[in-house]
């Protein structure tokens, strides 16, 4: 190529680079703005208070506790079921016609808008199974929402286990299940764990399905059991954003910072866990 | 066996006839198989829920009105059940989002795949993925509180609730969808094609434009369609920033209501179940489901055809 | 019948999908001896080997007909469980494949642990005996807890052999066990094979004729899925009965 690059080239390259930088800059501005607003409202009393008609007194405690409950129950439902599905599909499924149908189906489910999962939750969990507007209904709904993600991540982790390891196990006279339990699963575990945690973190930020299932925005007590009414962080933020008074907008900003902090911790934990487990395997 | 002495003793305790699978193992395998069909059950659940209530809806409100009327006012005294305003609202916001996401996403993909070094790519690519990791409620807040006032400085006629602001923010959110999958498509274009073009003296830009992009075209289209489906199904950003007026217009400065936002509105309210008004959310959801199913389906079909052509 | 680990193959046909790879082979391998299977690549040696312990059928499009008799019992009989068979007929693979998430001693015990047949009070003894039989004990006895994959290639292969020995099979199938190893490691494993044949029947697939000549008692020459000749090693390499064998061992094709 000739020494001096034509100006058109440089412009094009610059345009491409800006396409990467601009959205990131916008995101950075968004976060800075939210944090600046939240700074005016975020303190321990905010975290420890209950919702209130007075913005200065309103806090996020029930929403925080509700989210915590939701995360735990959602994970308890979606992760074992998702991992089990992935094991079956990847190790037993083979290339049959049914496997192909299931694979296409999972890809489809991953593309269904989250609000439709809310309607599924409403129709099946709240009404049909009679769970009413409880934490259990919310967790089942979110669990169903992230199930395809858990399955896909787990299948990926299983696929990454080299086949010669399975052969070695069969060669020793182990059955399929013994091979899975003793050799394949331990090797696939880092990927599965990371994928599951990332899937659950997605559930933490979901609002629409919970709105449809009937999360409350004004509860004055902390949920104690799975059948209690509940709130959640995104729901509370949504409620505050929808109020006209500007003071509530500061609450919303503070709530957003709390939400993002939770996400940061969870995602950071997932990445740390993956690095740690991979190091242990490689040693 | 080495389990008890050094010499190899006689065998006789290891028959090859029989079965190695214990009772427990059989049960576990049956349970696993059951889990394998879970996803199908979920699809059946979604379809059944939607179909049942939508059926009831259509027995009260005819097809003609749903698809013929241009007003959507099921919660008002004077009830109209024409779906078009909601479809309009959905498509306008999605269109605006695509106007942002497609060019920026594509250019970003080109930068990451063609210009960025491995080190830069390893930093910028995950950074872009961050955009997809921000909860939509946060984007909704941003659209209402920051973007709309900022745009109002440029266009004073812009209303507090409008289609432009959430559309733009949605676009930013789905950039990673376009860029990530397009980048995979670009990356898959064999290096030899590029080298052939360079060898003939073509510059970077025109090589990309004339050789690489056409080769990656179907992958890019598939990614755009996936992003479109995502934009159509987005809820919170529009629920917060687009308003609740189901206007049948294409004016982005006015308030619009998308299919998703309507469902949220009814869910937040206290419409009693079993009523026609309540059933509207299922009818709307069915429409939404059909839209996203078709768009996703086309996208997957394109990917599948591409894979077949490449001999996977 | 005595269980000496005699292998008899009767009219074995095997293939993948629509491709037949092994065309009706019949042979008897002497027990407590080393039988080498040689032949140009693609002649079906590995497929034949993998039919003996029914590993061949783990591939979804694989098929086979015929009989393989282990001490007079047909391993393809309807009521035979292939998994149980593999606890009597062990296998060592071309590329050493110790379990990456296990230590050396856990690797040795893995066969017993996976199948739930380990008696923990014997564990230490089994580890020492298996590693000793595999000529690896002296090199690793001070670092039994080190990861299996921290060993060199040759050591890893001996670890895999120890792992197979721990399950106390009668027959050990080896599929080109030295092809990924350097000459020194190869020589050590050939020595090992000579020791092992006192207690185990060994079937060794190799593309290296010199190795077959050095290490085996009987040699079978396969060509395009057919058994051309099976004789005592010394005879096959000095006075082959078939002209095709002679052509192969004199290097006319390979």
Image: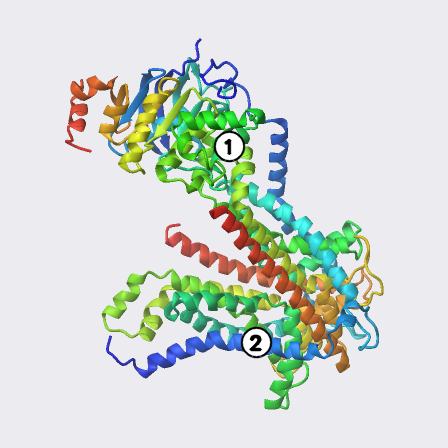
Q: Is residue C139 above or below residue C214?
A: below
Quote the CA–CA distance across marks 1 and 2: 52 Å
Q: Nearer the viewer, residue B151 or A23?
A: A23
Looking at the image, the residue that sits furthest to the top is C1
In the rendered view, does A145 fall on the left or right side of C224?
A: right
Looking at the image, the residue that sits furthest to the front is C142
Residue C75 image point, x, y percent: 44, 20
Does the residue at mark 1 contact the one at mark 2 (Cβ under 8 Å)?
no
Q: Residue at x 74, y 75 (%)?
A: A251
In the rendered view, does C143 fall on the left or right side of B130?
A: left
Residue that mark 1 sits on: C110
Residue that mark 2 sits on: A28
Element under disc 2: helix
Q: Is residue A41 above or below residue A217?
A: below
Q: Is residue A137 above or below residue A115?
A: above
Q: Is residue B215 visible?
A: yes
Q: Is residue B18 above or below residue B126?
A: above
Q: Residue at x 39, y 24 (%)?
A: C172
Question: In the figure, residue B56 lies in which quadrant?
Answer: bottom right
Residue B79 image point, x, y percent: 77, 72
């Amino acid at each position: 190529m000739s020494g001096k690059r034509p100006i058109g080239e440089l412009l094009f390259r610059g345009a491409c680079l800006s396409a990467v930088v601009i959205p990131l800059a916008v995101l950075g501005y968004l976060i800075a703005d939210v944090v600046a607003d939240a700074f005016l409202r975020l303190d321990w009393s905010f975290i420890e208070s209950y919702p209130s008609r007075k913005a200065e007194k309103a806090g996020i405690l029930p929403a925080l506790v509700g989210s915590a409950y939701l995360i735990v129950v959602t994970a308890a439902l979606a992760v074992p079921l998702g991992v089990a599905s992935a094991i079956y599909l990847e190790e037993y499924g083979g290339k049959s016609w049914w496997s192909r149908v299931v694979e296409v189906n999972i890809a489809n489910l991953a593309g269904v808008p989250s609000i439709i999962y809310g309607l599924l939750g409403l129709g099946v969990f709240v009404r049909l199974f009679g769970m009413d507007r409880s934490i259990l209904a919310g967790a089942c709904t979110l669990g169903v929402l992230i199930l395809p993600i858990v399955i896909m991540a787990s299948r990926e982790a299983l696929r990454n286990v080299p086949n010669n390891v399975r052969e070695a196990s069969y060669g020793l006279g182990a059955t399929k299940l013994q091979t899975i339990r003793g050799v394949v699963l331990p090797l696939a575990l880092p990927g599965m764990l990371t994928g599951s945690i990332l899937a659950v973190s997605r559930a933490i930020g979901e609002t629409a399905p919970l709105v449809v299932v009937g999360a409350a925005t004004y509860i004055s007590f902390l949920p104690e059991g799975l059948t209690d009414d509940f709130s959640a962080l995104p729901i509370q933020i949504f409620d505050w954003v929808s109020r006209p008074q500007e003071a509530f907008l500061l609450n919303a900003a503070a709530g957003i910072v709390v939400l993002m902090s939770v996400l940061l911790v969870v995602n950071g934990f997932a990445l740390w866990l993956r690095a740690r487990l991979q190091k242990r395997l490689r040693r | 066996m080495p389990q008890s002495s050094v010499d190899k003793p006689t065998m006789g305790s290891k028959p090859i006839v029989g079965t190695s699978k214990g009772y427990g193992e059989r049960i576990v395998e049956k349970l696993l198989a059951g889990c394998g069909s879970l996803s199908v059950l979920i699809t059946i659940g979604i379809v059944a829920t939607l179909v049942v209530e939508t059926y009831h809806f259509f027995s009260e409100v005819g097809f003609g009105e749903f698809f013929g009327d241009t007003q959507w006012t099921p919660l008002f005294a004077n009830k109209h059940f024409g779906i078009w305003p909601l479809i309009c609202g959905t498509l306008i916001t999605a269109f605006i989002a695509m106007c942002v996401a497609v060019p920026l996403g594509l250019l970003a993909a080109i930068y990451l795949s063609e210009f960025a070094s491995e080190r830069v790519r390893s930093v910028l690519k995950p950074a872009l993925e961050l955009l997809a990791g921000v909860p939509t409620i946060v984007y909704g807040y941003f659209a209402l509180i920051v973007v709309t006032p900022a745009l109002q400085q440029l266009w004073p006629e812009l209303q507090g609730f409008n289609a432009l602001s959430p559309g733009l923010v949605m676009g930013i959110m789905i950039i990673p969808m376009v860029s990530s999958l397009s980048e995979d498509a670009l990356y898959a274009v064999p290096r030899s094609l590029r080298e052939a073009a360079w060898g003939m003296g073509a510059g970077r830009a025109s090589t990309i434009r004339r050789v690489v992009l056409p080769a990656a075209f179907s992958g890019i289209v598939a990614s755009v369609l996936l992003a479109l489906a995502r934009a159509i199904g987005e809820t919170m950003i529009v629920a917060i920033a687009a308003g609740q007026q189901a206007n049948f217009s294409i004016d982005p400065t006015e308030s619009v209501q998308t299919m998703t936002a309507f469902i949220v509105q009814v869910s937040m309210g206290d419409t009693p179940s079993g009523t026609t008004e309540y059933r509207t959310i299922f009818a709307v959801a069915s429409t939404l489901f059909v839209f996203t199913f078709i768009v996703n389906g086309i996208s997957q079909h394109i990917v599948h055809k591409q894979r077949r052509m490449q001999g996977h | 019948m005595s269980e000496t680990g005699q292998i008899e193959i009767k009219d074995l046909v095997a293939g993948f999908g629509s491709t037949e790879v092994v065309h009706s082979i019949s042979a008897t391998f002497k027990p407590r001896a080393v039988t080498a299977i040689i032949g140009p690549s693609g002649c079906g040696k590995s497929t034949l080997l993998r039919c003996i312990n029914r590993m061949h059928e783990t591939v979804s499009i694989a098929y086979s007909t015929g009989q393989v008799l282990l001490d007079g019992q047909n391993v393809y009989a309807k009521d035979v469980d292939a998994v149980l068979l593999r606890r009597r007929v062990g296998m060592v693979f071309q590329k050493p494949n110790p379990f990456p998430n296990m230590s050396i001693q856990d690797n040795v015990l893995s066969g017993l642990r996976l199948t739930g047949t380990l008696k923990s009070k014997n564990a230490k003894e089994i580890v020492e005996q298996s590693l000793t039989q595999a000529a690896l004990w002296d090199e690793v006895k001070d670092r039994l807890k080190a990861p299996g994959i921290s060993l060199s290639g040759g050591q890893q292969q001996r670890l895999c052999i120890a792992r197979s020995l721990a399950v106390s099979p009668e027959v050990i199938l080896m599929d080109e066990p030295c092809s990924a190893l350097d000459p020194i490691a190869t020589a050590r494993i050939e020595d090992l094979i000579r020791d092992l044949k006192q207690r185990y029947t060994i079937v060794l697939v190799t593309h290296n004729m010199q190795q077959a000549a050095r290490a085996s008692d009987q040699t079978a020459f396969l060509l395009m899925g057919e058994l051309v000749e099976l004789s005592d090693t010394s005879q096959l390499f000095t006075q082959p009965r078939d002209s095709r064998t002679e052509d192969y061992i004199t290097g006319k094709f390979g």
